[in-house]
């Protein structure tokens, strides 16, 4: 069931910038304190959490809102950002939504500083990476690159090779890929391969080792490591959870 979002939350003078984030339906914004409690969120984040209003989210932790493995990954990321006082930029993530569907997100987290430059929390922005239109791909002359990645799913493929396919320099290719897909070329290749792996995990009884080779990860260990980093689930957990969905 789709929840209606309660828009009655009052935005005070200090939070005027949140009105801008509320207008971005594909961008989730939040800030947290050092205890991991949410202090600011936008409406897209509320929807992602499956709640109806900001009031239901503020003061909560990731473990109160998201599945255990996903919350653990968020908290590990947060701890790294806060403890090292260093940003996490453009982390590619495949996230299971409340309705059971999956979506790709690109996440950036930055430490928040108070007096004397002490870290007092963090801010996070996650952008939903919608699949671009064929027209958008064609406008940047990326059709051949897309086909090359798909046709060489099980092979090693370099950015230099894809640049030659596109008839441009690697720097030009990176700019085009960012413009159309919101990803670097190597991130795009990873996304295509993991998407193929999720389909095989859902729809076939192939072993994890067979799927690893078919999608270009070469061995089960490498595949499991990459897959877990992107999804917060092992391939086996993903298969079991997908098949238990209604």
Image (cartoon, rainbow, N blue to C red):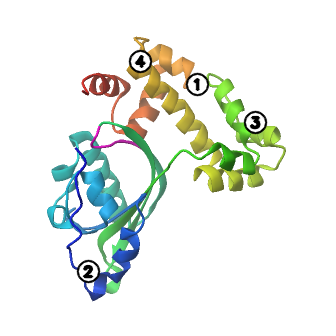
Residue 216's tag is 1
Question: Disc 1 vs disc 4: Cβ atoms closer than 8 Å?
Answer: no
Q: Which comes sooner in the sequence, label 2 or label 3?
A: 2
Badge 1 marks a residue whose secondary structure is loop
**Does 156 sit left or right of 126 as displayed?**
right
Residue 91 appears at what percent x and percent y? Answer: 47, 51
Question: Disc 1 vs disc 3: Cβ atoms closer than 8 Å?
Answer: no
Give the vertical position of 43 relative to 222 (above or below). Answer: below
Q: Quadrant of residue 156?
A: top right
Query: Which residue is depicted at the point 58% across and 25% down?
Result: 216
Give the alpha-carbon distance from disc 1 to disc 3, as whole Å.
19 Å
Q: Nearer the viewer, residue 21 or 236?
A: 21
Residue 144's tag is 3
Residue 140 appears at what percent x and percent y? Answer: 74, 50
Give the alpha-carbon distance from disc 4 to disc 3, as whole Å.
28 Å
Give the vertical position of 190 relative to 114 (above or below). Answer: above
Residue matched to label 2: 11
> In the rendered structure, does residue 95 fall within the stretch colored magenta?
yes
Give the alpha-carbon distance from disc 1 to disc 4, as whole Å.
18 Å
Q: Which residues are magenta?
A: 94-99
Q: How many marks?
A: 4
Residue matched to label 4: 203
Q: Which comes sooner in the sequence, label 1 or label 4?
A: 4
Give the alpha-carbon distance from disc 4 to disc 2, as whole Å.
46 Å
Residue 22 appears at what percent x and percent y? Answer: 36, 69
Question: Disc 2 vs disc 3: Cβ atoms closer than 8 Å?
Answer: no
- Report if residue 243 is visible in the image: yes
Query: Which residue is depicted at the point 56% across and 18% down?
Result: 214
Q: Quadrant of residue 46?
A: bottom left
């Amino acid at each position: 069931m789709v929840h209606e979002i309660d828009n009655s939350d009052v935005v005070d003078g200090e939070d005027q910038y949140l009105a801008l984030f509320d207008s971005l339906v594909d961008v989730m914004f939040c800030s947290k304190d050092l205890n991991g409690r949410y202090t600011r969120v936008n409406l897209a984040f509320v929807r992602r959490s499956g709640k109806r209003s900001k009031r239901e989210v503020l003061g909560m932790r990731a473990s109160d809102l998201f599945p255990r493995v996903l919350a653990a990954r968020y908290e590990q990321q947060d701890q790294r950002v806060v403890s090292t006082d260093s940003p996490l930029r453009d982390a590619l993530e495949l996230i299971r939504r409340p309705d059971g569907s999956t979506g790709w997100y690109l996440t950036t987290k930055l430490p928040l500083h108070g007096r004397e430059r002490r870290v007092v929390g963090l801010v996070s922005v996650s952008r939903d990476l919608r699949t671009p239109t064929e027209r958008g791909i064609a406008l940047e002359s990326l059709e051949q690159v897309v086909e090359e990645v798909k046709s060489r799913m099980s092979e090693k493929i370099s950015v230099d090779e894809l640049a030659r396919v596109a008839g441009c320099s690697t720097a030009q290719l990176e700019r085009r890929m960012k413009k159309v897909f919101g990803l670097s070329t190597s991130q795009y290749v990873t996304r295509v391969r993991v998407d193929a792996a999720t389909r095989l995990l859902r729809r076939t009884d192939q072993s994890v080792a067979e799927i690893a080779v078919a999608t270009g990860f070469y061995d089960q260990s490498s595949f499991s490591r990459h897959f877990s980093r992107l999804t917060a689930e092992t391939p086996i957990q993903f298969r079991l959870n997908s098949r238990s969905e209604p």
